[in-house]
């Protein structure tokens, strides 16, 4: 096995990042070894080894964590492994950690956390949420069903483990994400609470 050092640069930024790639000769012309998903998820920010019979040019995507509303990928390289979303062995783990890349956003039920001052007075509020925006009943719903009608603001906190790193990378001021998306994912770190 030979170790080669590759340098990848992003077209958007002048930053240079160096990756170590292990190159292993094989009998086939090109073979990319499937990395165990558990190893990938445990290593979090390390790139997997790429196995090939000859050195070939390649591009490493340095994408940011992707967010679609409240649905996001926990790892920046989920897209690279999206072929494992339907894999019988790794599909469930991929769906949990790479929800957006696996197109499983509709299956995610986001439950907001609210403070103690946000609650429903009556037990049947959830079955009458269509009245939350009805002009005639809105004030009654505000007084009786604040939580079910989502009239309260959810608790502002960091929902992702890597918020400090994202902040260092400029996530908190990145116009690619809406203020609500940044607040939902890394509200505390981005001082949006």
Image (cartoon, rainbow, N blue to C red):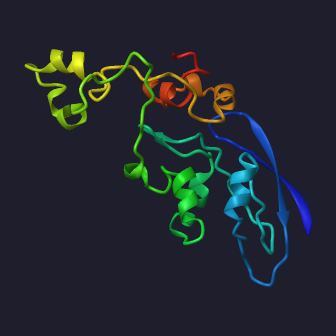
Residue 175 seen in the figure: no
Residue found at x 29% / y 29%: 148
Look at the picture and state if 17 lies above or below 58.
Answer: above
Look at the picture and state if 51 lies above or below 40.
Answer: below
Q: Residue furthest right?
A: 2
Give the tally of numbered discs: 0
Could you tell whether 136 is left or right of 90 in the image? left
Could you tell whether 104 is left or right of 46 in the image? left
- 43 and 8: which one is in front? 43
- Where residue 7 sits in the image (x, y, percent)? 80, 48
- 82 and 71: which one is in front? 71
Residue 113 seen in the figure: yes
Look at the picture and state if 188 lies above or below 80.
Answer: above
* Quarter occupied by residue 162: top right
- Where residue 34 sits in the image (x, y, percent)? 69, 69
Could you tell me which quadrant the N terminus lies in?
Answer: bottom right
- Where residue 59 sits in the image (x, y, percent)? 68, 55
* Quarter occupied by residue 53: bottom right
- 106 and 111: which one is in front? 111
- Where residue 96 sits in the image (x, y, percent)? 54, 53
Residue found at x 35% / y 20%: 152
* Quarter occupied by residue 76: top right
Look at the picture and state if 30 lies above or below 76.
Answer: below
Q: Residue furthest bottom?
A: 27
Residue found at x 80% / y 84%: 27
């Amino acid at each position: 096995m030979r170790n080669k050092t590759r340098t990848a640069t992003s077209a958007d930024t002048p930053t240079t990042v160096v990756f170590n790639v292990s190159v292993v000769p094989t009998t086939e012309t090109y073979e990319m070894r499937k990395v165990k998903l558990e190893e990938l998820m445990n290593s979090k920010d390390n790139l997997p080894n790429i196995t090939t019979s000859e050195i070939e040019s390649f591009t490493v995507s340095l994408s940011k964590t992707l967010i679609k509303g409240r649905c996001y990928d926990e790892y920046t390289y989920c897209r690279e492994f999206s072929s494992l979303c339907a894999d019988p062995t790794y599909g469930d783990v991929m769906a949990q950690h790479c929800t957006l890349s696996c197109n499983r956003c509709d299956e995610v039920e986001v439950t907001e956390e609210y403070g103690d001052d946000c609650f429903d007075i009556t037990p049947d509020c959830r079955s009458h949420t269509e009245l939350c925006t009805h002009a005639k009943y809105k004030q009654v719903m505000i007084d009786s069903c604040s939580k079910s009608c989502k009239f309260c603001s959810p608790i502002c906190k960091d929902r992702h483990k890597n918020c400090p790193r994202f902040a260092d990378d400029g996530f908190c001021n990145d116009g690619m994400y809406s203020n609500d998306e940044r607040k939902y994912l890394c509200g505390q770190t981005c001082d949006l609470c």
